[in-house]
Amino acid sequence: MKLTNDFFRVLSSEQDETSGTYEIALNPEHFIYKAHFPSNPITPGVCQLGIVEELLSAQVGQPLRLAHINNIKYMNIISPLENPTFQVRLTRIQPTDEGYSVQAVLAGEAASFTKMSLRLTPKGC
């Protein structure tokens, strides 16, 4: 399921060959939040992974899929009501034999939410 322009949208971005910084806005009315959880919506970890996957795919100009999670740390909950916008910082973007490796941080003004180190491969491989 594509999340860009439905679950979230990119407000601004800056990229270079090895990094990218994105300001994104969540859609608090998205159906995912009706199940996770109706009275206290939080952004599921799998959606956070999907956000990083889609941003990196757009940045490198190639559809990618998650191949391996080297490390992931969920430090704070992302509520679309309390934190409707936040930054996604992609660093250490490196091509590999199989695709790309990347480190990502999802953070608001006052706190970091999630840190992850991932390996992604081209879709279809």
Image (tube, helix red, strand yellow):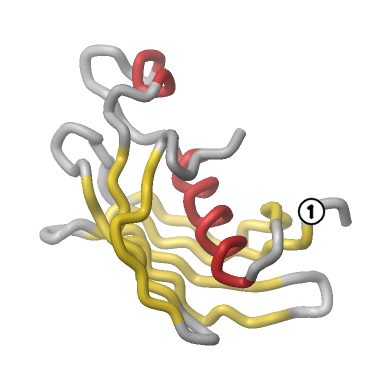
Q: Residues within 10 Å of mark 1 (few under 14, many from 20)?
A: few
Residue 42 image-quadrant placement = top left
Q: Residue at x 14, y 38 (%)?
A: 82
Give the residue type that dot 1 points to. Answer: Lys
Quadrant including the N terminus: top right
* Circle 1 SS class: loop
The relative height of residue 17 versus residue 88 in the rendered view (above or below) is below
The relative height of residue 9 versus residue 114 in the rendered view (above or below) is above
Q: How many marks?
A: 1
Q: Which residue is mark 1?
A: 123
Q: Position of residue 106 (x, y in %)?
A: 34, 58
Residue 83 image-quadrant placement = top left
Residue in front for this viewpoint, 8 or 46: 8
Q: Residue furthest right?
A: 125
Residue in front for this viewpoint, 61 or 87: 61
The relative height of residue 69 versus residue 83 in the rendered view (above or below) is below
Q: Position of residue 3 (x, y in %)?
A: 50, 39
Q: Residue at x 70, y 81 (%)?
A: 95
Left or right: residue 67 compared with residue 43: right
Q: Position of residue 78 (x, y in %)?
A: 27, 41
